[in-house]
Structures are given as C-alpha cells and as structure tokens.
Amino acid sequence: MSKVSRRDFIKFGAVSVLATSGVYASDMPVFRDKDVKFDEEWDVVIIGSGFAGLAAGIKANERGNKVLILEKMGRVGGNSVINGGIFAVPNSELQKKNGVKDSKELFISDCVKAGLGLNHVELLGILADRAVDTFNFTVKHGAKYLDKLLLEGGHSVPRTYYTENTSGSGIVQPLAETFKNLQGCELRTRCKFDEFVTDENGAIVGVAVRNDYKFDKNLFSDDKENKSGERKFIKAKKGVVLASGGFCSDKFFRKLQDPRAVPEFDTTNHPGATAGALISALKVGALPVQIGWIQYIPYKCPDEKGNGITSKFASQAAFRYGISVDPKTGKRYMNELADRKIRADAMFRIIDAKNDSYPINLCDSVAAAKLVESDLANPMKNGVIMKFDTLADLAKHYKMPAGELEKTVERYNEFVKKGKDEDFDKPIKLTDGITISQAPFYAMRGAPKLHHTMGGVKINTKAQVLNIDDEPIKGLYAAGEVTGGTHGASRLGSCAILDCLTFGMIAGENI
Amino acid sequence: MSKVSRRDFIKFGAVSVLATSGVYASDMPVFRDKDVKFDEEWDVVIIGSGFAGLAAGIKANERGNKVLILEKMGRVGGNSVINGGIFAVPNSELQKKNGVKDSKELFISDCVKAGLGLNHVELLGILADRAVDTFNFTVKHGAKYLDKLLLEGGHSVPRTYYTENTSGSGIVQPLAETFKNLQGCELRTRCKFDEFVTDENGAIVGVAVRNDYKFDKNLFSDDKENKSGERKFIKAKKGVVLASGGFCSDKFFRKLQDPRAVPEFDTTNHPGATAGALISALKVGALPVQIGWIQYIPYKCPDEKGNGITSKFASQAAFRYGISVDPKTGKRYMNELADRKIRADAMFRIIDAKNDSYPINLCDSVAAAKLVESDLANPMKNGVIMKFDTLADLAKHYKMPAGELEKTVERYNEFVKKGKDEDFDKPIKLTDGITISQAPFYAMRGAPKLHHTMGGVKINTKAQVLNIDDEPIKGLYAAGEVTGGTHGASRLGSCAILDCLTFGMIAGENI
C-alpha cells in the first residue's frame, strides 16, 4: 500500500476481444471496455423491471437521460407484479386524516425490532423521509389505492396502503406504461444481463447482455446452464442501476447461504428470482452484506406452487384454533402463534424434504367455520386441504401414529380449557376457547416457503453501490431486494414496495 | 457465456510493476504475477499462526514442502493463544474409557441445533470423522490435556478435553515449537499479508506482504491506515493457506455486517483480529458465506478489556441467582438464563453505548457466596464489581430510579417464592430458592462482547476456497474462523479448536 499509488495501477492490454480481468477462475468474465465493441449506447441501463427498476427509469428520464430497462423474463415486473400490493407509508396524509400518530422514529424502531437490530438505520431513515414523496410519485403515474389504512404485523400503527387491485401490479402496470411512453426510453424483455463492462479504473461503463433470451425454469441453475440468446454489449454512459431483485428461486446460491433451503423447497417468488446479477456485482467488487439471511413464510403448503391458496386456512384457522404436528410422531413441535421466524425454524427442524415429510396443520369444524367460505372451499377442490370424519382417519391419511395424534389433541384441548399451553406456551387466550373436538376435521401439509433474501450489496443513501473497501463503485447504483442491510434479519410486511420504489427513485435521481 | 471460452480470457499486459486487475475501484490492488518481481520463493505460504496455520504448516512440511508462516503481530498465535483451551473430540478414547456414548450423528445434531440449521453439514461431518486424529496430532507434537471430560453447553454428552494449562496456548506453543524446528520452514512475525498475487487464470501464486510491520491497535482500521513495513512479494509455488482468523476486532467491517457492533463495543478477541485478509480473499473472488452472523458472549463487562475476570460473577451468580436490570428504568428486561444469543440480543436492545449506558447485573450476598472466593474478590479489587449495603445505595451509584429497583426486586423475589417468573419465564428451579434479600448486594455493569465471526469464505471438504461460481480457486486454501458455514448461526463452545486444527491439517495435506 505505502509503495503503491492509484495512478500506478494498470491499464492492461488484452489479446482477446472478449477480455476478462483474469482475476476469477470462472467461466463468467468481467469485461473491459477496451476489449469489447459496443453494439448500442444509452445514458442509463437498468437491470430489472420491478418496482425499483421502473422508478429508477422514470426518475432518470426526468433528468434528461435516455434509459434502457433490461428484463430477462418475457413479462415485465418480476416479483413486484405478483406482490400483495401493501405499501407502508409512515407519516402519510391518510394517517393524518384518520388521526394516526406516526413518526420517523417509530417507523425505524418497528423495523429494527423485526430486523433484530441488524438494520442499517441510515437507509431506513431515508425510507421514512421519502415515503410520502414515493407514494405521491406512484399516484402521479397512475397507481390507485383503497381509502383505508391496514395495520400490518410488526407495525405499531396503521401505516399501510393497499392498492385498489390488491396486488403490486396496481403499481407496476401504470409505472411500466409511463416508462414505455417516455421519449428515448425502452423496456426490453427477454434481454439477459450477464456481466458488467468496466473501464481501467474499475468504473462500470456498460453491460454484456443476451437478446432474445429464453429463461428456462426447468434448469437447476438458469444463470449457469442457459445458453440461449445473442451476445451484445451495451454502453451505459452515466452508469448502471442494479434492480434485479432477490434470489429465493436460485437453487444453487440460496442453499450455500442457508443449507435448509434444499432444492425441493418452494418459494413465493417467481422462477426468475435468481442470484446471477448479484454474483456479477460481487465480481466487480460490490460489498456483500448479510447475505446469509433469508426470510420464510411459515403458513404455506408444499402441495401447491408458490404463494398458493392455503395460507388463510393455515394462519387463521389451523395455527390459531388448531395445532401443527410432526407426522412422524403425531406430536406438536412448536407454538403455532410464534413469530414467522420462530415458526419457520421449528418447522425446518422436523421437515424431511427429501423424504417428502412435512408437518400437518389441522383444526376442527368450528375453527374452519371462522374462515371466509372460499378460503376453505377452493383449496379443498384442489385437494390441498382435506376433510376427515375422525382424527383416526386423518392420522391414517398422513401415515401418522393414530393413538399419538389422539393423545396430542386431548392434551392440547386440556391446555385450551386451562388457559395455559404447558408445552409450547402458545397464547391460549387467542384461541377463543376453541378446542379440536367437532368433526369433521380439516388438515393440510405445511411448509415454510422462501420469501425474501435479506442480504445483498451494500448501498449508501445515494443508492451508490459500495465496494469491499467501503467506497462507491463509480457508475454502479442499486435498489430493492438486491441490496442488503436495510431490513436486517427480517423485513416487515409492506416495507418492500417502499424500499424498492424509494431507492429506485434515488438511483434515478443521482445517476 | 455461450460465445466466450475459457481460453479466450486474458493474458493482459501491464504498464506498471505494481499491477492490479483494475477491476476494483480500490486502493488495494490484486497483483498479477507477470507484473511483480518475487523477492523470495516458498512451496507453501500460510497466513496466520494460530491453530489452523500451525497445523497446516506442520502437515504441509510432512509432505516435503518448504513452508513460510506469516504473522502480522509481534507474537505468535492470534486468538488461539488466548483461547480457553477446551477442545471437543467426538468419539474420543477418553469417552470410551468413561463409558460415554457419542457418535458422528450426535455431534452434528448438537452443532446444527446451536447453528439454527444454517450449518454446512458436510464440513461438520469431516470434523467428526477427523476429531480423534486431530487430537492425536496435537498430543504427538506435545500438547497435554487433563484426564477428564467436560460437558460443555449445547453438547449432549461430555466430549470436551481441557488443556493442562487451561489455555489454547497449551496447544499453540508446542505446535509452534515443532514448526520452528522443521527443516526449511520459517515462522515470521511482524509480516503483514496485504494482497494475493494471481496468474492469468486467477490462480493464487503468491502474496504481497510487508516485513517489519508494526500493528497499531489505536487506529480505527489498522488494515486501511497503517503504512508501516516494507513491501515484498513472495512466491508460493504450491499455493497459499488463509488461516487469518475472524474479524471481531475490526471496527470498520464488523459494523457493516452487524450495526449493533459499534466501535465502543469490546470483544474477547486480540486486537489483530481484523478483516483485511478476508477482504483480500473476496477480491480474488472467494465466495462469502453467512458473513452477517457474529457470536456474542453475554456475561462480559464493559469496564474491563477483553475477556476480563467478571464472567463467573455474571454467569454463575448474578444471572443465575440474581437479575439484570436496565439502569434507565430499574426494571428487568430478559430471562437471565436464556441462551447466549437471546440474552445478547436483549442486552443490545437496552444498551446505549454512545451514552455509556449498560445493564446492571446484581445479586445478594447468599448468591455471591456461591462463587469461588477469588472470582468475587479479584474483580472487586479492580472496582469492576461493587458492593452495596442497600439496594438504594446500589441504585444511586448506577443512577437508577431507586424506588423502581426496589419494586423490581420485590416482584422478582415473589416469582422465586412462587416458582414462576411471570415476566420473562426464567427457569426459577435453577435459582435454588435464592432471592435478592441478604445485604450486602453485589453488582457490575454488563455487556455482550463480540466473540466469533461466524461467516467467512466458503471451503469444500478439502479446505479449498470456492469462488462465487462454486469452483475451487486454484492455489487457495483456508481453515479456521476465516471460513464460514461450518457452525451456522452460532458455534458451540469447544468446537473452535477442533475446526481450526482439522481444516488446517487438511489444507496442509491437500496443498
């Protein structure tokens, strides 16, 4: 160090048109500008067309930039378009109208509590400061919201808007329409970002992509195995925004970070949520933050794909008024009303995915009657929730020791009557005195599903990506789930939209 | 990808003797072999002289290699030499002699339980398979152990040896003596590893170091700020073993991964436990695994440096027979006998390090009398444990609301009498009916201290470092705390020695 100045560093020559830095023993090179011929040129290139990418694109164009958004899938919007459409806005107009007192401090403290104190609070502060502005940005571009606030789990006050169509598509679609109509901008689907192109100082000056890419969800690793498409190099005069989302669907990378997430495990994410773009950012020196943390949703079902339609039965009936048991023993193994992380961890301990053994969530007919009818009827039509006349039938169907299940139910019912769960300390008062007694009985197989990858690249409050020496990588910005640290160990529901949009906007403003 | 073959990659030319890959916008280059003049040449270079480095060095020499071990500090042994000297050996001879039934499966299951299921079990399997061999290796080279087994927390059976001198130095010193006497080997202190030297394919072929380095523990970041020493380049013909330990003392890097670990926080580690070598490995493409997880010890004191001498008072007297209170409120805030992680997390929530506000751990004289006398007397001489005639005096000294403290103690004493802690569910049966009643009262300020950084680079079962495409980086091996994944979220006590020595040996055998 003492003997080396920055100016001494290399401007190295190359013998190949498709040059790499040579640093990585990898089949995926980092490209050098002098060794590639750019096929096209834009001011700003954005990787990903979800909340973050679209917000970045519109904001960058407002500042006079020609913007290209790349989307590897055939459809726009990534996970954002299948998102549930709930959007936390601390200090909103609607809160004021409804007399809800909120504050930046309260918002941060809620997030930090859920995040187990691992949150990078300077980023949360930006979310609180910009939330109303971000919300108004979406309204201006055509998003519509219901005129009521939700109180989401972990939030101290009602601060969550709900899109009119109860989906993130209520925001993605108008933003995508806006963007597509902008002068000098393009949203290109089936265009796969592969690697960055850097200049001699490591600044990001472009991207290597493949046009006409066909994502293949049947591959173990689409990023590594899929050879489709035609290689092009795109220059990004002002820089690149990485808005590529998380990696819950990446069977290779997620298992390295959380070995419980075996390939057999499902996710609530769309199949394109892979780690390729994140890994490419690590190759150009982006600082990895908290990449080991993955958020799971415990009230999902392994017998249906993705989000599915059994969540309400699990969370509102079986977990609340019934029990979850290990089919190998017929016994309970957790407090069915603990927080998401505790429940997911407990379920992982008894699940044997390779042998297709999952916990059974069950309740009786009094509990099931608490549901909106379609939330029980539809999953029953699909056969993912089953009805049984006796507990013995239920046990037989799931290959459980019937005697043990009956003992478990008897013991649990005693706890409900006594008002105290002596085994797992479930808060019995929330069960409204409902036991597991009235036939028929309803049951489903349960599993946590991967929902959100908490870690990613480190950004500063300007959405600049920092390198492993904690300095901005010139020309590289990031926003949304591909970044790490903001939400710490666990993100509160309805904060994803706020995070993705806000840092997307900031990236677009600063690039 | 499709259009790029490995052979097309660059053999790039350079204009400077001190060349970098140019990929990183950093002041710390990765060096290319063709651009440096090597000052010396060894078969194997090892970074770090703790358990892992010494084991690697001896094993590599057994196979005929000339080995250089680099140690940046003035003394040998890093954290290993201040380690507590407890060494888990599943399936040991002493277990057999004592009729203790152990197994590979039981060892793995204990570790995975503590590690919250995040463990890379293939690495744990290697530890179980090799444990006896590793233990015998240390005995062969002069380590001595007490003839009894300890039952350490989280282990299902007694499987832990204790060095005769109750310190890791009982292993480090004989191994270091062995190594120093080996033909053609050298252990060089005050030699700082800075960066790797790679060949054109990214293989590790040497290191850039500084001789006559003087570590400065007063710098915020020694790795970034310290300019001492003289740059040399060392060729490593067969490769490099990274055995540089964890980063609990790195005020810069640890806070990025766990923002609770503010600079004011202390660690049980030696001051040289920084992230510089790990960061250099990330620069050559090493795959980061679970870097966000840090293990804390909750029964430490902010009023003494490092490990200190108050732990026994906190863990065996105040936490067990007394309480821990928040000085701002005079109230309890946790189950004082919860697991390490839960307690550390609870303490973090009330600590305000910037305003020097820490929880108070206290008990009465009956509780204090349970301690070995010196464990109370010595910290009292240093003034880190204080004695008070009344609870009011105690409250006054720590600027607590006295009335509130008295109410808290009264409420807690009721719980002890009833046999049930209605506030935090402390297992009252472990308090032996001891309340907080008999003056004098004893107290200390408490704080969790950083103990072990769980994450690091990914290795395979041959101790090869994997890159971000999951392939071995040629010429690069790693062992010990700088690696990640083996212990998941939390390492069991006494598994560090086993891990460091075993993978050190494996690195030395395979390089």
Image (cartoon, coloured by chain):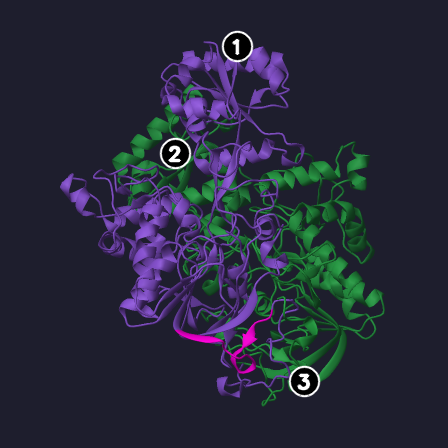
Chain colours: A purple, B green
Query: Badge 2: how crowded within 10 Å, few (<14), some, or many (20+)?
Result: some
Chain of the residue under label 3:
B
Look at label 2 and name its amino acid. Answer: Ala
Q: Which of the 4 image quarters holds residue A97?
A: top left
How packed is label 3: few (under 14 Cα within 10 Å), some, or many (20 or more)?
A: some
Q: Which residue is mark 1?
A: A389
Question: Furthest residue to the bottom?
Answer: B15
Q: Position of residue A261 (x, y in %)?
A: 58, 43
Return the disc, 3 or 2, that comes first in the chain's sequence.
3
Relative horizontal placement of residue A28, taking residue B46 as reference (left or right):
left
Q: What span is colored magenta in the figure?
A: A29-42
At horizontal 49% and vertical 87% (from top left) the residue drawn is: A7
Quick one: A357 or B458, which is closer to the camera?
A357
Nearer-the-camera pick, B378 or B160 = B160
- Name above or below for residue A229 compared with residue B191: above
Task: Please name the amino acid that badge 3 sits on.
Answer: Lys
Q: Vertical placement of B160 versus A299: above or below?
A: below
Q: Which of pointers 3 and 1 indicates the residue nearer the eye?
A: 1
Disc 1 marks a residue whose amino acid type is Asp
Discs 1/2, front? 1
Return the mark for residue B439. Answer: 2
Residue B34, disc: 3
Q: Secondary structure at mark 2?
A: loop
